[in-house]
Amino acid sequence: MQVKGTLYLPGDKSISHRAIMLSSIADGKSTIRNLNDGADLQSTINALKACGAKIDSRNQTITIEGVELTNPNEKLDCGNSGTTTRLISGLLSSQKLDFTLVGDSSLSSRPMKRIITPLQKMGCDISSNDNLLPLTINAKEGIRSIDYKIPVASAQVKSCILLAALGGDSPSTVHENILTRNHTEVMLKNMGATISFIDKSINIYPLKNKLNPINITIPSDPSSAAFFAAIAVINDNSELTLNNVLLNKTRIGFIDVLKKMNCNLAVGNKQLNNGEKTGDITFSTSDLTSVEVESEIIPSIIDEIPILSVVAAYSNGITIFRNIEELKYKECDRLHAIIHNLNAFGINAYEKDNSLFVEGGKPDKLAEITTFHDHRIAMAFTILSLTSFGKYHLDNKDCIDISLPNFFNLIKRVAE
């Protein structure tokens, strides 16, 4: 297969969630373009509408009129979205609301204690199914300030606390051991919140006034870009340009990994968009080498490890991803899913000492892709199967709609 051309990908999922949520409590009308079109964003939109948010979608532009959110009359269905669940828990708590969150079977198996603990310390009355969904949060007594050290690196947990703290009685501080994606902090500052940073600590002040509305075109999702970067670098005679990609340093760890793997890439047209850096990236066929990915970079590539493991399958030598425990707690146990599918296609991959090892070579067996109903597993191994065999067979094609419904059309647009 040969890959040629230029793509403009849907908006970044993380920024899209935050833009919708923060605009819903801002003072006035916000305009959002290039919103991510995945099912996860619909979960966020529907949950906020159930709380009275005024959200209108016309001609691929979203307009949101900030309002006083109210207690919902129904359970809020977060679908498959961990971002919706954890961030909206903080946002609605800041508004002193009483609400219940539910989700699909996959989301209902994901750990929620990591947000339950700090929210309880902040004064929320919370009940759960043994630290799983359904999750009922009553914040009507108000939010207390907190000084909290996050035990497991998680941008979702950090964001939950920061959003809840907007309604606090005094400033709060969040400490990270490892820096995670900082879109919440960037957007809060850009919308007028008082927030400051010292090393790996974040100080957030309660809102004295409502947030300023925003007018934003969401940059292309780097997590989606990673799949198309991969298909360009592992196929012969290929070159692909991805336009207006988010270049936030907490999100482009996969580019650093690809560079270390001897990937041919170039970044141009750098700009600043609502506090976020963007640019155009061109990827081309590369003679890839194995690398050791240290634990410090894992939080910034946690969503890209499935596709990076596929790239590693075409590299020379053994690629090692260190400290990958968090992979087990995504939409599925992604560590198991990666190893299972690589082995099925004839690539030796295994876990040892909390690290993922992938022995490079080339897939030599056509296999059915076991998605485990995880969109990133499905897309990563579709690319592997198409590259080596020109065809693919997924046990669940629909799960890709979670983040990139147009995935197959985009591939057809650039693949020959």
Image: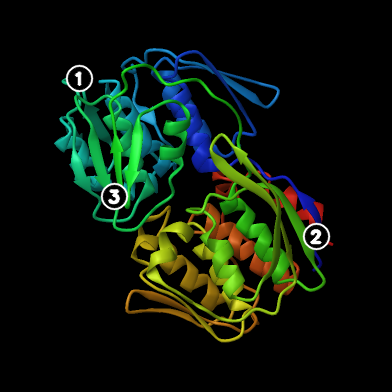
Lower sequence index among marks 3 and 1: 3
Please state which amino acid type lies under the numbered disc 1.
Lys
Frontmost residue, 226 versus 334: 226
Instruction: Give the mark count.
Output: 3
Please provide percent x and percent y for residue 352: 36, 80
Please provide percent x and percent y for residue 131: 22, 45
User: What whole-number distance in Å separates the C-alpha atoms at marks 2 and 1?
Assistant: 54 Å
- Which element type, helix, strand or loop, lies under badge 3? loop
Name the mark on residue 111: 3
- Which element type, helix, strand or loop, lies under badge 1? loop
Identify the residue at the far bottom of this view.
317
- Is residue 171 found left or right of 57 in the rendered image? left
The image quadrant that residue 94 belongs to is: top left
Name the mark on residue 415: 2
The image quadrant that residue 323 belongs to is: bottom left
- Is residue 398 found left or right of 140 in the rendered image? right
Please state which amino acid type lies under the numbered disc 2.
Ala
Which residue lies under the disc numbered 1?
140
Lower sequence index among marks 2 and 1: 1
Please state which amino acid type lies under the numbered disc 3.
Pro
Q: Which residue shows up at 65% across the image and 24% down it? A: 61
